[in-house]
Image (cartoon, helix red, strand yellow):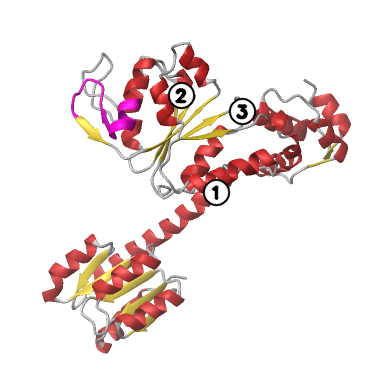
Amino acid sequence: MPRILIIEDEASIRRVLTKILSEESDTYTVDEAEDGITGFEKIKATDYDLVLCDIKMPKMDGVELLEAVKKIKPEIPMVMISGHGDMETAIQTMRLGAFDYISKPPDLNRLLNTVRNALDKKQLVVENKILKKKVSKHYEMIGESDAINHIKDIIEKVAKTDARVLVTGPNGTGKELVAHWLHEKSERAAAPLIEVNCAAIPSELIESELFGHVKGAFTSAVKDRGGKFEAANKGTIFLDEIGDMSLSAQAKVLRALQENKISRVGDEKEIKVDVRVIAATNKDLKHEIAEGRFREDLYHRLAVILVKVPALNDRRDDIPLLIEHFAVKIAEEQGNAPKSFSTQATKLLQEYDWTGNIRELRNVVERLIILGGNEISENDVKLFASK
């Protein structure tokens, strides 16, 4: 049930607004405050879905209140109520984050439309927060081994900074999880995390993919197009399998890191970007440097913080937790109750040689859930998980 607070020092206007909103919907709960300080105390104590706030009030005016609320509860939409002489100030409040403003005396249709739109926005903010929590759960790092706890400690220390991170480890170990956790725990979490799989993009297209291009830069460039660095502005770019990037693209990435500027393919114009870079590779980059396939100066730019993700064979103590985690996730995806694994089945899986790492383990767990009994037994593992 939407809860609305009206902050207005004129009692007659408060009564009119309350009457209008109450008659509009019997689902609205409407509270009142006669000045800015009282209104601020109510906002601190209550989760409102919308605040209607007068601009000129005693004790604390509407502009001061707006600035104070945005610091503690920025998700609450605030609609400012302005007199004829307050229009310039009302426009200023929009720059400070107000959702909208309405003039005195309030036009009925405009008021109701503004209220509906503001409540819709608040609902969207709530849904986005729920979705973000689901995304965070999707990229949860499972494990309590020393190696995984060490990685978690590094993430906690590094996430709040803009330090570049190079994540290394074999395929299938979950290097992308480190990138997602670094981003979601950072000050850039509200901005996008843009992922680029450097190994999946042909070498002749990687520069266009990263930096964009202008119309006519090459045969298929029929219009201007921004690249991944522009899309990640104010956020994070994750360059997965950077060891597969061409040397010419490496040079441009190095320049972007040095100068915080990029140029689209076919254009000399420079575009400023504010991007945090996280890179990952399954290759030994020092060997690649020695072989002339990777730039040493780029390596040192990227490897401010090094995170090595261990192979699953090096963290076997985490396998029971991973099996339980995957069993629950797969059951949710299939709409079934999760199956349990017997102690002997789990021990047998702990002894396997997991050359495909966590990715392989998940596939085996899914196969066992589909083909095995109600409780996955040691015999099920021997029958369906043999390598």
Magenta span includes 132 = no
Q: With respect to residue 67, does 195 lie above or below? A: above
Residue contact at pointers 3 and 1, CB within 8 angstroms: no
What residue sits 42% from the left and 21% below the top? 296
Q: Is residue 15 above or below residue 232?
A: below
Horizontal and vertical percent for residue 154? 55, 43
Say what amino acid the circle numbered 1 marks: Lys
* Cα–Cα span, label 2 and label 3: 16 Å
Real-space Cα separation, disc 2 to disc 1, in angstroms: 28 Å
Percent position of residue 110, x then y: 24, 68
**Residue of label 3:** 172
Residue 245 found in image quarter: top left
As drawn, which residue projects farthest toward the left?
Answer: 85
- Residue 79: name its quadrant: bottom left
Residue lying furthest bottom in this view? Answer: 11
Side of 98 where 244 appears, left or right: right
